[in-house]
Amino acid sequence: MWIAKLSSGIEIDVSGSLRVLEIENGFYVVGQEMLIPVNSREEGLEEIRKIKEGEC
């Protein structure tokens, strides 16, 4: 298990499959040992698509 800690003290398990989480009024793509801030759920889903298709 991989844990990322935000400056606010919130800990997030970043292991597992890619997903979009809303945390503290912000959105993040989380999974595969990554934590990527995005502006919206839709942007997060697009980021996941790019990662899965190898565009990043």
Image (spheres, rainbow, N blue to C red):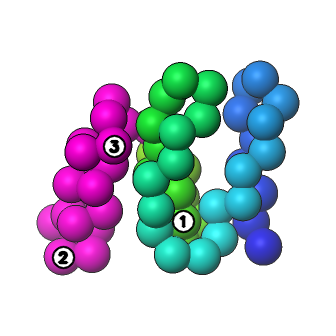
Residue 17, image x, y percentages = 51, 75
Q: Which amino acid does label 2 sit on?
A: Glu
Category of crowding for the residue at label 3, using alpha-carbon neighbours closer than 10 angstroms: few (below 14), some (14–19), many (at least 20) = some
Of the numbered discs 3 and 2, the one sitting upstream in the chain is 3
Q: Name the residue under label 1.
A: 31
Taking the spot 60% from the left edge, 76% from the top edge, the residue there is: 16
Comes first in the chain, label 2 or label 1: 1
Give neighbour class at mark 1: few <14, some 14-19, many 20+ (Cα, 10 Å): some
Side of 35 relative to 55 (left or right):
right
Image marks 3 and 2: residues in contact by CB distance under 8 Å: no
Name which residue type carries label 1. Answer: Gly
In the current view of this chain or complex, which residue is farthest to the right? 9
Considering the numbered disc 2 on the image, is that residue within a helix, a strand or a loop?
A: loop
Image quarter of the C terminus: bottom left
Q: Which badge, 3 or 1, is on the more N-terminal residue?
A: 1
The image position of residue 11, as x and y in percent, is 79, 45
In the picture shown, does residue 55 fall above or below 41?
Answer: below
Residue 32 position, x and y percent, is 53, 71
Distance CA(mark 3)–CA(mark 2): 18 Å
Which residue was labeled with disc 3? Answer: 41
Looking at the picture, how far across and down is residue 43, in whole percent?
A: 25, 43
Measure the C-alpha gap from mark 3 to mark 1. Answer: 15 Å
Q: Measuring 20% from the left and 64% from the top, which residue is drawn there? A: 50
Numbered badge on residue 53: 2
Residue displayed at 18% across by 76% down: 53
Magenta stretch bounds: 37-56
Local SS, label 1: strand
6 up-or-down from 1: above or below:
above
- Which quadrant would residue 46 be assigned to in this image? bottom left
Nearer the observer, disc 3 or disc 1? Answer: 3
